[in-house]
Image: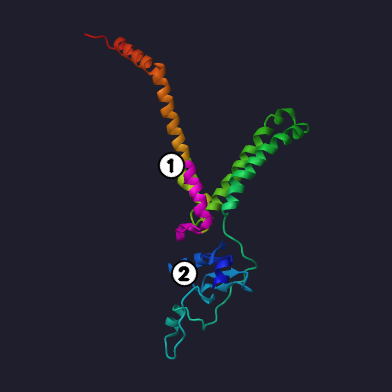
Amino acid sequence: MIAQQQQQWFFSTGGERIGPVGFDYLLELAKTGKLDPRADMVWSSSLNDWEPAGQVEGLFERRSLEKGANPLEASDAFANTGVHEKAIISKPVSAGTGRMGYIMGAGVVPAVLMAGWQFVVPVLARYTPEDLAVYLPMVVFPLAGLMVLVTLVKRFHNLGMTGWWFLGFAIPILNLWLGYRCLACPAGYADVKRLDGIGKFVAFLYWGSILAGIGLAVAAMVGAFGAMKESGLIEDVTRQLEELRKTAVPER
């Protein structure tokens, strides 16, 4: 059991292959009924091939097929006596994009692409018609944007969410929550609602940095207000507004 928890596991459910995940993650799926013991397949380095989840030791509770018992009831109790058809899967492939893939695909690679493109443009400009060369610096932006969009959609699929959630990054406050999910949450988080060790550490850094930024912004605003008050700027503005009011609305 200890060896199982130390291994990385992959599983196939609903036509999607997800991983790597920890064995505790599979246990949580099994307990909540989100992992089918017969239809869903699992794999790790300790297995020769993909196996039905119900045949993995320690993943489901099994009852022996007692004499005279209803075969269907025993099967539903995950009895390990029947013959299960194995899916033919060549190698484990995770569905969507994980945390590191998100950081690379939505941040690092587009930034490097845009920075490197500035060195490529002068070379291409020599062989490009003059009326088209002016557009070369802008070519990289749709390419980088497409890469970010594809990465976001695949990341949400990895989390068990629909890819249309990428539109939420245009909405204030909601974009902070989506950023947290993309950076901190492991595969299938929408179903399990549990963070692993790395996810908890990243979540602490993420929300801590946001709170620190808000604190610095508030402190800067308070400091700026105090400086304006000491300089008499606020009194001057107040007096000018009062004079404008009197001019617009003559006193009777």
Residue 165 in sight: no
Q: Amino acid under label 2?
A: Ala
Percent of width and height locating residue 61: 46, 77
Percent of width and height locating residue 66: 44, 88
Q: Which mark is residue 173?
A: 1
Which residue is under mark 2?
30
Q: Which residues are magenta?
A: 188-210
User: At 50% from the left edge and 66% from the top edge, which residue is drawn?
Assistant: 24
Q: Earlier in the sequence, mark 2 or mark 1?
A: 2
Residue furthest to the right in view is 127
Residue furthest to the front in view is 230
CA distance separating discs 2 and 1? 34 Å
Residue 129 in sight: yes
Percent of width and height locating residue 74: 44, 82
Q: Quadrant of the N terminus?
A: bottom right
Residue 238 is left or right of residue 181, and the answer is: left
Percent of width and height locating residue 111: 63, 40
Kind of element beneath mark 1: loop
Residue 252 is left or right of residue 237, and the answer is: left
User: At 46% from the left edge and 66% from the top edge, which residue is drawn?
Assistant: 28
Kind of element beneath mark 2: helix
Q: Magenta residues: mostly which secondary structure?
A: helix
Q: Is residue 156 above or below residue 176?
A: below
Q: Tell me if residue 89 is in the magenta stretch.
A: no
